Image (cartoon, rainbow, N blue to C red):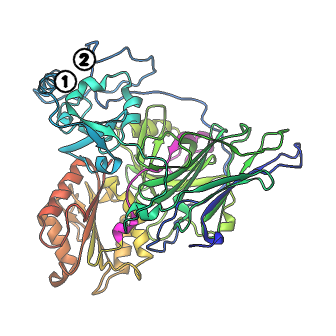
Amino acid sequence: MATSDDQPIVIVNVTQDDNGPKTGNLATISTVPPAINPTLSITPTIFPIRRYEFQPPKTSMASSSSLLGADLSSSTLMMAPPKLNTVKKSRLLVNPGKSMVEWMKIQQELTAKGPSAKLRKIGFDELATHNTLGDVWMAINDRVFDVSDYTNYHPGGVEELMKGAGQDATNLFNQIHRWVNFESILRGNLLGFLVKEPTLRVVRKIQPGSLSTALSCLPSTKFSEDDNFIDSHMDGNDVRQESWTVGLLNRERLILKVMVKPPKVWMTHLRLLKALTDDNININYENNFKRALITLKKPQQQERWLKLGVPLSDHHQLVDSRASIEDMYPAKLVKRQKLTRNSYMFTAVTHTAAIGVPIGFHVQIRLTQNVTRPFTPVSLTITQPNVEVEESALQTNTQELHFIIKIYPDGQFTSLLENLLSKTKEQEIEKESEIDVEIGFPRGNFDTFFLHNISNTLCLLAGGSGITPFVRIIQYLYHRRASIPIKHVVLLFFNETFEDVIWAKEWQDLAKENESPSSWFHFYPVISKPVELSSEEWTGRVSIKLFEQCIQDCIPSASTKDGESKAIICGSYGFNAACKEVLKQQTVLDIDDPSGIFIFNG
């Protein structure tokens, strides 16, 4: 068992203003996440941190779009909608015979027949596996529905509906049209009920390699008035900077989340003893990021704090990162840099939270009350972490996150973002034009352990802005070439034109850096609408022939099946489905389905 010095802990200091009393002015929370049997040593990716003047958003707007999209006038289906300031969105046409009227006829027939199977309990892990076209489940208000057949009837379009595929879509549904009676629309497609994660408990029987191995002890919590701290112990966890998220909500709720084993998160949630007058949060990391020191400023003239706060209902619980937990933190977009004709690198800054984003995870960015989209943070360069700093230098109340965002003229989120930026310079946002946004807690289920048992080739298939999760994956592998036995990393990057390829030169330089008989990285920009033929690019769309040609071009035929290979896909839903079919039918690499294929959806 690790010594106390090696245990990952969190200490919260609450300090008194100069005008307040000088005694009893320190309250401390010390928290250690649950034990994990570490399987690898990981160097943390460190986000750059600077200081900015910050004012929280003062306004909130609302807009509307469509998830289930029902607009029938029947009183059994709809209640009067609340009065909101809405943004009119053009209605998508459905195919003949695919209207909501036809869908409700189908529901009546299904209801008349009765349920085909007994309703059952469904967990997040099972729900997440049904997230592709033709196999779509989603949860709304703890009910799980099979909406595979409904996708073609959805008036808002397939893309809009697929945003909730394989996950708890309650918040997404409520943002768009909470007044719709979804139970009537999907009553014939009910599968069962979503199982929420239970409170942590002692595990008596441990199965090797299971989550039980990672969480084999119950965290212990204690409070002492003399030395003013609460200790919560969890031994042996492999914690790095991106494992931590610490946030302050409404100056009165302190939330700490630690990524235990993706997608599982251990959560501490307290209502502070007194509401704060300053929402700045200062964080310092120690002991190789196993300890976080969080300092909050006490209100003036407050009495001694006998305890930090009151535990809330989800305090000391193990939750799924994909669950609908509302914690959005105010931030500002302070900079943008043009990458291609319609793609930009945006920098967001927050000071009420330190949001650690594990590799392959995304966060929600909210522009207004109803306009929210998921984005994956990236590093500033392909091969180097954002900033190499000492832990002692991480005493700050600001944090930067970087996002690559492609502007779509008809996109609800990006068109609104473009309007907000309309009066700014081409390369950088003016200080007075900084944009207020909100950023949520990271979500996802990618585990870097997926990368550690590949003995041959890792294929990365990216469509457009789907390149974003691969930036940090490639960076992670680049710095671990000596310890991770992957022979070849092959990136197939699909775009309309070569000018659309994000970081084209950087990818090419990385490939040239590794040119040798045993080349490690291979880059193939695949263009569907070439302006002119070039030796630097391949043309076409996703196909078995193109995929096999790329693999045979960079890997000797004698070694293509020499060991296990895997693939990761990220793009639009149609792109993801096409790539998965290609990987299942190709014959040049030994890729198991589904264990050898990971798909980033959304």
Q: In x, y percent, where is residue 365?
A: 47, 43
**210 or 217: which is nearer to us?**
217
Give the label on residue 72, or none. Answer: 2
Say if 241 sits above or below 149 in the image: below
Q: What quarter of the picture does the N terminus occupy?
A: bottom right
Quarter residue 409 falls in: top left
Residue segment shown in magenta: 424-451
Say if 186 sits above or below 15 in the image: above
Q: Which residue is drawn at 19% across and 33% down?
A: 150
Q: Which amino acid type is shown beneath numbered disc 2?
A: Leu
Q: Residue at x 47, y 66 (%)?
A: 381
Quarter residue 231 falls in: bottom right
Residue 368 visible from this viewpoint = yes
Q: Residues within 10 Å of mark 1 (few under 14, many from 20)?
A: some
Q: Residues within 10 Å of mark 2 (few under 14, many from 20)?
A: few
Q: Between disc 1 and disc 2, whose residue precedes?
A: 2
